Amino acid sequence: MAVEPLSAALDWHALLGELGLGGFNRELAQHSELVGVADNVLSLRLSHTHRHLLQINRGGPEKLQEALSAHFGRALRVNVEVGEIETLTPAQRNQAEKAGRHAAAVAALEQDPFVRELIERFDATLEEASVKSL
C-alpha cells in the first residue's frame, strides 16, 4: 500500500492544535514557520529572536519529529533552521487573533448604551486594558 505524500499546503497552525505538545516543545513549534514539506521531511524556520528555544531544548526537533510521526502514522523527519520569518508563525497568528477579539470587545463596550451612559454621567473612561474578550 502506497503512502500518500504530505501536502505542501499543510496547515501548520491547525496541525499544532492537534498534536497536543506541551512546554518547550510546544513553544518551539508555535514560534516556527513551516517552510516546506518534501519526502517526509518538514522544514521549519525559527526566528533569531526565539533561537533560545533550540538552545535550551536541544531535543525539541526530535520530540516534534516523534509527535508528527505518531500523528501521521509514519516516520517523518523535522529540520529546524534559524532565520528570518517570512510568514506568520502560529504564535504570531494566535496573538493577532487575540488582539482582534480584544478590539471587538472594546468596540462592543464602547457602543453599549449602559456603558455610554456611565461614561457620560460620571465622566468615566473605559480602561481598555481591563477588557477581556469571551
Image: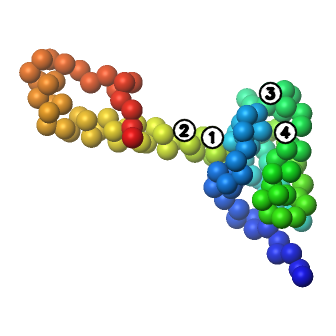
Q: Above or below — where is 66 with respect to 103?
A: below
Asked if marks 3 and 4 touch (Cβ < 8 Å), the reply is no
What residue is shown at x 89% (from left), y 45% (from top)?
62
Crowding around mark 2 (Cα neighbors within 10 Å: few <14, some 14 to 19, many 20+) is few
**Mark 4 or mark 2, whichever is nearer to me:** 4
Answer with left or right where residue 61 lies relative to residue 26. Answer: right
Tell me where residue 22 appears, x and y as whole percent.
72, 39
Which residue is denoted by mark 1 in the rendering?
91
Crowding around mark 3 (Cα neighbors within 10 Å: few <14, some 14 to 19, many 20+) is few
- Write down the quadrant of residue 76 in the picture: bottom right
| Distance from the alpha carbon under mark 4 to that under mark 2 | 23 Å
Q: Amino acid at mark 1?
A: Ala
- Write down the quadrant of residue 53 in the picture: top right
Q: Earlier in the sequence, mark 1 or mark 3?
A: 3
- Write down the quadrant of residue 63 in the picture: top right
Which residue is denoted by mark 3 in the rendering?
52
Q: Quadrant of the N terminus?
A: bottom right
Element under disc 2? helix
Element under disc 1? helix
Asked if marks 2 and 1 touch (Cβ < 8 Å), the reply is yes
Q: Earlier in the sequence, mark 3 or mark 2?
A: 3
Element under disc 3? helix
Which residue is denoted by mark 2 in the rendering?
95
Q: Earlier in the sequence, mark 3 or mark 4?
A: 3
Q: Amino acid at mark 2?
A: Gln
| Distance from the alpha carbon under mark 1 to that under mark 4 | 17 Å
Crowding around mark 4 (Cα neighbors within 10 Å: few <14, some 14 to 19, many 20+) is many
Q: Amino acid at mark 4?
A: Gly
Residue at the extreme top of the image, as rendered: 123
Asked if marks 4 and 2 touch (Cβ < 8 Å), the reply is no
Element under disc 4? helix
